[in-house]
Amino acid sequence: MTKVALVYRTIGERTSDVALELARENIRPDEEYILDNCRPFTKAVAKMVAIDYASDYVVAVDADSLILEDMRPFLDLNDRPYVDCYVHDRFRGRLHCGVHITRVDIMRKMAEIEPPVDDEAYVLRPESRLRKLALNELGELKCFKGFRILHDHLQWLRDIWAKYALRELRSRTPEQRRKLDAAIARWSESDDVEHVVAAAAVGWAQRELPDGSPPQVLSDAIARLPELGAEHLAALGIEERGPLDRAEVDAHRAAHVARWPARTANYKVFGLGLSRTGTRSLTAALHTLGIDAVHYPVDEDTFRALESGKLDFRFMQAFDGITDITASPYFAQLDAMYPDAKFVLTLRDEETWLRSCHNHWLGRDPFEVTSSRGREIHLQIRRFLRAATYGTYRFEPERFRWVYRQHVAAVRRYFADRPGKLLELDIVSGSGWGPLCEFLGRPMPDQPFPHKGGVLTARLEAEVDDPDD
């Protein structure tokens, strides 16, 4: 049985007491640690990573997260090094934040890393930055899992102001900017006081902390956000709401479940597109729709399942599918193993795909020297899947062009007389929610289609994208 530690982090949120009750009920931890009013957040992170855990996994829960689903069955099955949880956010829709599941060796590696100096990513997201550095050192990757968790619902209005001032600072990349702007556009159609407060906070941060502000200026401002929230609420002439009780949460939960019913058809979904065709974007879209796919897993069990030819991935007990070249060459076998499964073939213009592949493979030597066991497994999987998919360890454009055409043709032939089993999707060219939701029988989200790894840039500017999709 997996041993689980709960780290509960609160700075006096309106949901603090109820959120802790729900975390205890739905995680049933073997250890419990409460970090109360540790400010700034870098201090809370430092305390969390310094704990000498006796558990296998650490579940960090922020007090703005109301867990409404039993997580323990997943925790007992899970073998991923780090799982970021998809939640339903009050302001931005379905996204990953608020609850994080981290294997204890990753947490210990985080404790060994010296916090970066003058690093904007660390200033804005200290926990995320340390975890990313730890995962990189150990050669591990994160994945995502969705739960019925309400994030930023029913909060103090002063906290909403502080959070959305910070959210503006965290949204200064093209993709994050696009998401926040889309959310603000939806808020403008509402006279909800929470949306009014959030929009005012975004406006303040844009004026007072413009893009390019030095990291130390940002750090100083972030430390003052809680007191500024109360001041600006008073300046807006808005009264704070009263304390929260469990009855209000239960009523809110019932309304949420009625609007967003649970997925009842638990078929698997496999993304058959080759790397750099929008596979990470597809994975994020599936998570938004409540389908928990794993993008390109790298671990010993995955390597064993691949090299044995059995494809009996242990993680498939807890997840809903796989995307990228872990699945691409094996569509017929996966179809036989999961008769009810659905398949999505992501496509892309050949020339832009080849340029993206060239960029992606640069600096990714399959034979690099490493002292990390996790990194060595990662490299073994990289070599295996490059050989299985492309028949080469190195990028060779004409070989890749031939493989792309052969793969698309083979998938189309295989599913030609089986309507409803395969969807072709060109995300880079703008295919979005409509065809995917219709194919999977899922409701249309009220948020933008995700664009990971620079595919939005590729679509809008016809330039080479980032090497991460």
Image (cartoon, helix red, strand yellow):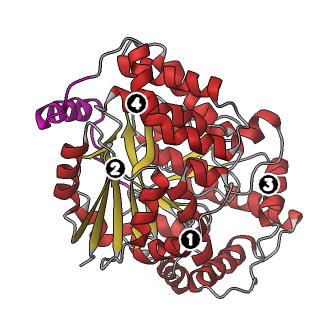
Judge depth for marks 3 and 4 and give the one in front.
4
Whole-number angstrom distance, CA of label 3 to CA of label 1: 27 Å
Whole-number angstrom distance, CA of label 3 to CA of label 4: 40 Å
* Vertical arrangement, residue 355 with respect to residue 183, above or below: below
Whole-number angstrom distance, CA of label 2 to CA of label 4: 17 Å
Sequence-wise first label, 2 or 4: 2
Q: Is residue 26 left or right of residue 140?
A: left
Q: Secondary structure at mark 3?
A: helix
Q: Is residue 30 left or right of residue 93?
A: left
The residue carrying mark 2 is: 37
Q: Secondary structure at mark 1?
A: helix
Q: Position of residue 420 (x, y in %)?
A: 47, 45
Q: Amino acid at mark 3?
A: Ser
Sequence-wise first label, 3 or 4: 4
Q: Position of residue 176 (x, y in %)?
A: 60, 38
Task: Give 46 or 255, whichever is nearer the viewer.
Answer: 46
Q: Secondary structure at mark 4?
A: helix
Task: Give 190 or 261, whichever is nearer the viewer.
Answer: 190
* Vertical arrangement, residue 297 with respect to residue 42, above or below: below
Question: Which labelled disc corresponds to residue 356?
Answer: 3
* Residue under the point 24% across and 64% down: 72
* Vertical arrangement, residue 312 with respect to residue 416, above or below: below
Whole-number angstrom distance, CA of label 2 to CA of label 3: 45 Å
Q: Is residue 242 magenta?
A: yes
Question: Which labelled disc corresponds to residue 160?
Answer: 4
- Number of labels in the image equals 4
* Residue under the point 28% across and 29% down: 259
The part of the chain drawn in magenta is 241-267
Whole-number angstrom distance, CA of label 4 to CA of label 1: 31 Å
Q: Is residue 138 left or right of residue 33?
A: right
* Residue under the point 55% across and 67% down: 141
